[in-house]
Image: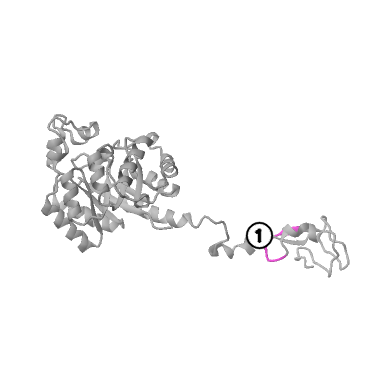
Amino acid sequence: MSEVLIIAEAGVNHNGSMQIAKQLVDKAVEAGVDIIKFQSFKSEKLVSKVAKQAKYQQQNIGKKNEGQLAMLKKLELSVKDHQELIQYCKKCNIRFWSTAFDMESIEFLHSLNMRLWKIPSGEITNYPYLKKIGSFHEDVILSTGMCELSDIEAVLKVLIEEGVKKEQITVLHCNTEYPTPYQDVNLKAMLEIGEKFGVKIGYSDHTNGIEVPIAAVALGATVIEKHFTLDKNMEGPDHKASLEPDELKAMVSAIRNIEQALGSGHKTITESERKNIEIARKSIVAACPIKKGEILTEENLTVKRPGNGICPMRWNEVVGTTAIKDFDEEEMIVL
């Protein structure tokens, strides 16, 4: 089995500060993730002046009268910021990635030779956006929050018609409530997506804690995406539904452990337990002293540890035979 791709979603948790952004890179490296992902957008191209904040954004920021445009403007990364972060990620030996939220940002990321595209849940119904990304014929990871199966089917149709091969697409089950209530996770839907569309599957998580992404890996997720922050108490829309660095590190460790634990899927004796066979299993032994020539019966035989003698599964083969020698009580029977 190939290793699960773990994406640490920094998103906009840098709060517009390059210092914080670089600290997030450092913490992602320490946690052992594969990719750190940011968000690329031009606020004016993304939202209108009348677009309101989501309820969770209002609660997390505490500015109910501030619209999305004002909020996002503070969180934009400039061209220079992107270039600086890319170089810093190279220096730290971690892959930089970003989600484009508008057509101009798609073109910009394409100029950076991104070669892997993230389609966020909010762009699922953005036909021009989907068509543009599909035209690159490159790998795609698709989040599916707020989606029915029919929505996913429509997106895949656009991408494939544009020339993206099905094997290049990974579909992430997702719920876009921040944080997602556990009863709304519906993790088994990830399996339905894989079965219905024949694509690689993964999970983009917005729950509190690390249990659900770990469970997703156990169910077969090939990609895990999770928001993280330096501090959940920082001001900003996504901090409260993000992991702190120690939690991110614990999630990565748990996922890597689960990957090993899943194994090959073929039931067999492992090398680590082989030595325990003799200790834990039993052999056929004399229940009482037995004389040579005496018939071996259910009354004068029993089974006891260790298991380096005749296996009790041969019981019927042994009962009724003649003792070839004298056996002391508890001595292993030989034929």
**Residue sitting farthest toward the right:** 293
Visible residue check, residue 129? yes
- Membership of 123 in magenta stretch: no
Question: As displayed, is residue 111 above or below residue 155?
Answer: below
> Does residue 118 appear left or right of residue 42 in this picture?
right
What range of the chain is rendered magenta? 302-309
Q: Position of residue 21 (x, y in %)?
A: 18, 52
> Does residue 307 appear left or right of residue 196 in this picture?
right
- Which quadrant of the rendered structure holds the C terminus? bottom right
- Which quadrant of the rendered structure holds the N terminus? bottom left
Question: As displayed, is residue 51 above or below residue 239?
Answer: above
**Residue sitting farthest toward the bottom:** 325
Residue designated by label 1: 281
Q: Residue at x 71, y 61 (%)?
A: 311
Magenta residues, dominant SS class: loop
Dot 1 crowding, Cα within 10 Å, few <14, some 14–19, many 20+: some
Q: Position of residue 197 (x, y in %)?
A: 41, 43
* Quarter assignment of residue 179: top left
Q: Residue at x 30, y 35 (%)?
A: 177
Q: Residue at x 14, y 57 (%)?
A: 84
Looking at numbered disc 1 in the image, what kind of residue is underneath it? Arg
Visible residue check, residue 228? no
